[in-house]
Amino acid sequence: MISRWLAAGILFGWAMMAAPGASAGAPVTTCDRLIAHPEDPARPPAVAGVAEAGKSRRALAWAACRLARTGYPAEPRFAFQLARALPPGSERRGLIEWAAAHGHTLARRLLAEAADSGRRGAASGASPGEKRPAPKGGQLSGR
């Protein structure tokens, strides 16, 4: 039991550890290192970013981003990155909308592209439930 708490404490400390290039609001975290998108202007400069994340990486990022979001609930970057770690459906859309509403540039772009894609589909006669390709640059999870 104590070893579980110790491991959780170490993981939390590592996830919250600041690194060079951290923004004024939140430090660079394990969440950033695991799933920050390379095209994200909010990505800390010290982090290269990950365009495509596999299932196991997304699982690790989910845990790290939950911790980061708990430590910095007002940071849109962590909401967006948590959305990237989640499977399609779930709470992903809500997190992206929250991040966009709080100034996250890439989240805003993805929502605008999705809305534009939906309008183009409607104009072409596509049914509302018809699957459409993801917007360019809209790869959230990197399947």
Image (spheres, helix red, strand yellow):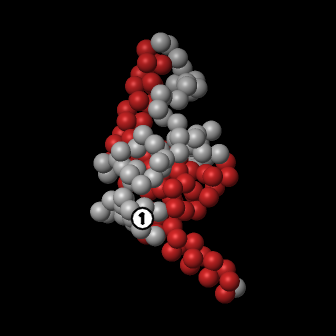
Residue 11 in the image: state x and y as whole percent. 57, 72
Residue 19 in the figure: left or right of residue 56: left
Instruction: Pick the residue in front: 24 or 132.
Output: 24
Furthest residue to the top? Answer: 124
Q: Using the rendered image of the protein, determine whether residue 134 is visible from the camera's viewpoint.
A: yes
Tell me the quadrant of the picture where the C terminus can be found.
Answer: top right
Could you say whether the residue bearing mark 1 is in a helix, strand or loop?
loop
Q: Residue at x 62, y 82 (%)?
A: 6
Residue 131 vertical position relative to residue 49 in the rendered view, above or below: above
Q: Using the rendered image of the protein, determine whether residue 82 is visible from the camera's viewpoint.
A: no
- Amino acid on which disc 1 is placed: Ala
Assess disc 1: are there few (<14), some (14-19) or many (≥20) residues with their C-alpha within 10 Å of its C-alpha.
Answer: few
Furthest residue to the bottom? Answer: 2
Residue 124 in the figure: left or right of residue 26: right
Tell me the quadrant of the picture where the N terminus can be found.
Answer: bottom right
Residue 40 in the image: state x and y as whole percent. 40, 44
Residue 106 in the image: state x and y as whole percent. 39, 41
Instruction: Pick the residue in front: 65 or 32.
Output: 32
Badge 1 is on which residue?
19
Residue 30 vertical position relative to residue 106 in the rendered view, above or below: below
Residue 123 in the figure: left or right of residue 140: left
